[in-house]
Image: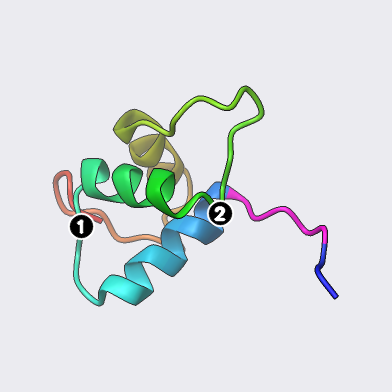
Amino acid sequence: MKTNRKINLQDEIAAILLDNEKPMTNQQIAAKVNERKNYIKKDGSEVTSYQIHGRTKSYPKLFYRDGNKV
């Protein structure tokens, strides 16, 4: 049975980083989010590196930032 739970961006970023097992740039994360299609914006447009930067900066307890790497 498929659940209707919608994944949020910070959960998708965390999953990508765990899968990758090493820091990634905002651009790399954005590309992976768009490739995996687990998180879709309401307007259907692609996630940008600026959004990744903003979300990871908003959740310092979840993400460690070093320059543009998360």
Q: Which residues are magenta?
A: 4-8
Residue marked by disc 1? 24
Q: Is residue 44 magenta?
A: no
**Quarter of the image where one finds residue 18:** bottom left
First in sequence: mark 2 vs mark 1:
1
Q: Is residue 46 left or right of residue 1?
A: left
Circle 1 packing at 10 Å, graded few (<14), some (14-19), many (20+), is some
State how far apart marks 2 and 1 are (Cα). Answer: 18 Å
Residue 5 belongs to magenta span:
yes
Amino acid type of the residue tagged 2 in the rendering: Asn
Task: Name which residue lies at 23% across and 41% down.
Answer: 27
The residue lying toward the viewer, choosing from 48 and 23, is 48
Q: Are marks 2 and 1 in contact (CB under 8 Å)?
A: no
Estimate the x, y position of residue 3 in percent, counting from the top left: 82, 66
Could you tell me residue 9's position as x and y percent? 54, 48
Question: In what element is the residue under mark 2?
Answer: loop
In this figure, which residue is indicated by the disc labeled 2? 38
Quarter of the view holding residue 41 = top right
In the displayed structure, would residue 43 be above or below residue 49? Answer: above
Crowd class of label 2 (few under 14; some 14 to 19; many from 20; radius 10 Å): some
